[in-house]
Amino acid sequence: MSLFAAEDLTVNFGGIRAVDGVSFEVEAGQVFTIIGPNGAGKTTIFNLISRIYDPTQGRLLLRGEDITDVPPHEIARRGIARTFQNIELFEHATVLQNLLLGRHAHARPHFAAELLFLPAVRARERASRAAAEKVIDFLDLQAYRDSLVVNLPYGVRKVVEMGRALCAEPALLLLDEPSSGLSVEETADMAFWIQDIRTLLGITVLMVEHDMSLVGAVSDRVLALNYGRVVACGSCAEVQAHPDVVKAYLGG
Amino acid sequence: MRVPFKVSYDQDLGLFRDPVQQRWYAALLAGTLLLPLLVPDYLGDLSLVFIYGLCGLSLMVLAGYTGLVSLGHAAFLGIGAYAHVYFVQDVGVPWIVGVALAALITAAAGVLVGLPALRMTGVYLSIATLAFALIIQEVFTRWERVTHGLKGRPVDKPVIFGVSFGGDLAFYFLCLAFLIAGLWLTANVLRAPTGRAWVAIRDSEIAAQSMGVHLARYKTLAFAYSAALMGAAGALFAHKIGFLAPDIFTVLLSIQFLLMVVVGGLGSLHGALYGAVFVAMLPVLISQARDQAPQWVGHAAGLLGRDAGSAAYLAVEQFVKQPGLEPGIFGLILVLFILFEPLGIYGRWRKLQLYFSVFPLYKRATFRRQKTYMRSERLR
């Protein structure tokens, strides 16, 4: 059984069919990449998985379990964490606070206990901090721990956002254009991290990406979309060579 | 520049950054305990500062930390005040139970406002809370059995466990105790997951939701907690003013609370207190200036000749007797703060601290923000 599957996913915005009958399966331990020209519906698929949009039709399955009707705030608890195309960090909080918020899916907040900051709350905070520190070490964020996000350069923010998602200890990590806005070196670092996330942390990665060198370096499977429809699916080389993909990108 | 040496996660979990800061706060506490000896004439004004401090905390939680701007917080203060007075004087419950009931009822009112407010953001939410405050004011006027309507109702002196806190000094310490308790509880929540969830909602709802924050639950919780603080403040406020009438809890009072958190500095507990000092003490300063200003200006202008002096005296006297002077000055200060110091008094204080700690290397550009990055596809 695959870790995650989308079955016949369709969504209409008014008269526009942004995603049209898309089906795919992500096996555990894979890096699965969705590519496609602008407006192909890649980010819409992510927003469907995060349950920000309701699909018009189709199902989402995580470990065979239907998550199509799960409320959006439950998704993280089920084991799916994500990043955003235009970084959505908590800007007026420190990097550490952002990462700790990533632990929210594992927190069992009890308001009365928090008011008095009972020992149980303290113990949980200590445990969250230890988990966040592991991510800090993994992504080399030690130098930025207490900086406000608003003061950080773009490339670091991108890493912090990925760190926040990792803090949720997801089974499936959604990365929406992890390399957009990054320099060549930063993109190379990103490729290493994505590989490490898969092999060292054992997290399955589903990503949307335009940079074909990054896609080629890390992807096990690639899905090409155009106008909300699947054009091709397979290894990176297969998809790149597929005549319909070439047509979608170059026209003709 | 002092950098605390950290060896344990518990150092970051404490209420204070390091022992040095802890000692400063101890000194501040000692100062507030000794203050009645230094300025015995101003005890009434200082108790009001503490009560406003609680109000500031309340709105800071909602506006400063959760990003929900309320223009109706005076209504919560009123609900707390009336509920407390009703339960203590008509029902006859003990004083402390009265405060607890006032806080509970106000929290319930907060939830009621919070529920429809979940679908609204920004200015729409502010308008909704404003409407709520107007309705509540009408309720205060009409529900005569509890509020005594427009006649108003006198408030007895507080008596707790048989001890009267009616005197200025005793009431000063009562208010101080409530403020410290409120600060402690709020600081606790803010360093726990709930506080982080609030900040997350303020900065990016969509990301907060994707990380597992139940938006509706945490927004309602913020409303309820904020309202409960306001309710407790209302109980003290009732005793402070000694007479409740519906026209006390007007929109202008709500705006004063908002002024408090903006001038103090949004997003910091310090800011709530700076704002409280500012809002509670400004009328005192204005009334003193009102008495003194004509003389000062008259004397100064008198150097140019007797006629100029008396003319200036009369002109200034006429000006300061204008009835709208106080709200006018409030408004002017609010505008100036938003223009020149959006981070408020607390922000200015932080800049001053940094200036001295890195002297002489301070750069003005340190606090200059870059334009924010494009968020073309930002989801709401």
Image (tube, coloured by chain):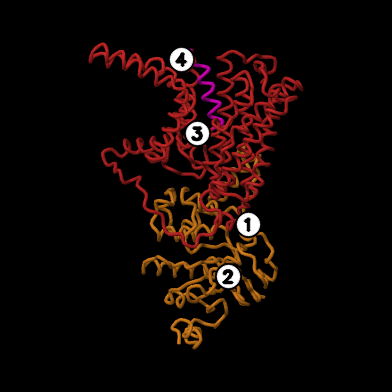
Chain colours: A orange, B red
Q: Residue at the location (72% across, 24% down)?
A: B86
Which quadrant of the view contains residue B127?
A: top right
Residue B78 in view, yes or no: yes
Q: Which mark is residue B39?
A: 4
Gap between marks 2 and 3 measured at Cα = 43 Å
Q: Residues within 10 Å of mark 1 (few under 14, many from 20)?
A: many
Which residue has dot 2 on it?
A45
Residue type indicated by callout 2: Ile
Circle 2 SS class: helix
Where A222 falls versus A82 (above or below)? below
Circles 4 and 1 in contact, beta carbons < 8 Å? no
Gap between marks 4 and 3 measured at Cα = 23 Å
Q: Which mark is residue A73?
A: 1
Q: Residue at the location (64% across, 26% down)?
A: B246
Residues A193 and A80: in front is: A80
Same-subunit check for callouts 4 and 3: yes
Q: Is residue B342 left or right of residue A77?
A: left
Gap between marks 3 and 1 measured at Cα = 31 Å
Segment colored magenta: B41-55
Taking the view exactly as shown, the residue that stands out farthest to the left is B304
Residue type indicated by callout 3: Ala
Q: Earlier in the sequence, mark 4 or mark 3?
A: 4
